Image: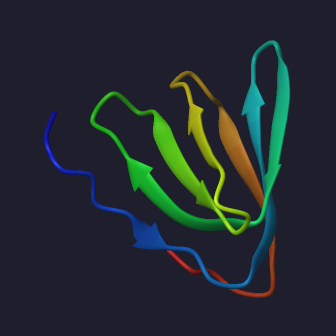
Amino acid sequence: MDSLVFSPVVGEKSRTYVFPSGRYEVAGVTGVCVRPSGSHRLQLADGGKRIVAPGWLAIEVVAESWSL
């Protein structure tokens, strides 16, 4: 596997991925790596990690300003 490059996410309270079948909310995202497939690998403030599969229609972000 190639090395992952995460972009820092600053000041984001939460993000919600909107899929045709529903929504997936994630809070405390500190870094994101966008893969060629369209999936997102997320690093969380609590040390957790999430992978969001491709196929989302939109991302709703709660933040005071853009970080990416």
Q: Quadrant of residue 1?
A: top left
Determine whether 28 is above or below 18 in the image. Answer: below
Determine the residue positioned at 41% across, 70% down: 7
Q: Which residue is found at the position 41% from the left and 33% from the top?
A: 38
Is residue 35 shown above or below 47? above
Q: Position of residue 67 (x, y in %)?
A: 57, 80
Q: Is residue 56 left or right of residue 36?
A: right
Q: Quadrant of residue 20?
A: top right
- Report whether 20 appears left or right of 3: right
Relative depth, front residue between 17 and 42:
42
Q: Residue at x 51, y 25 (%)?
A: 54
Q: Position of residue 49 (x, y in %)?
A: 59, 47
Task: State how the image is colored.
Answer: rainbow
Count of marks overlaid on the render = 0
Which residue in the rendered view is the most extreme toward the front? 47
56 sits to left or right of 15: left
Q: Is residue 32 above or below residue 1?
A: below
User: In this picture, is 1 found above or below 68?
Assistant: above
Left or right of residue 20, residue 47 in this image: left
Could you tell me residue 43's position as x and y percent? 56, 58
Residue 28: where, in percent of width, then height? 76, 66
Residue furthest to the left in view is: 2
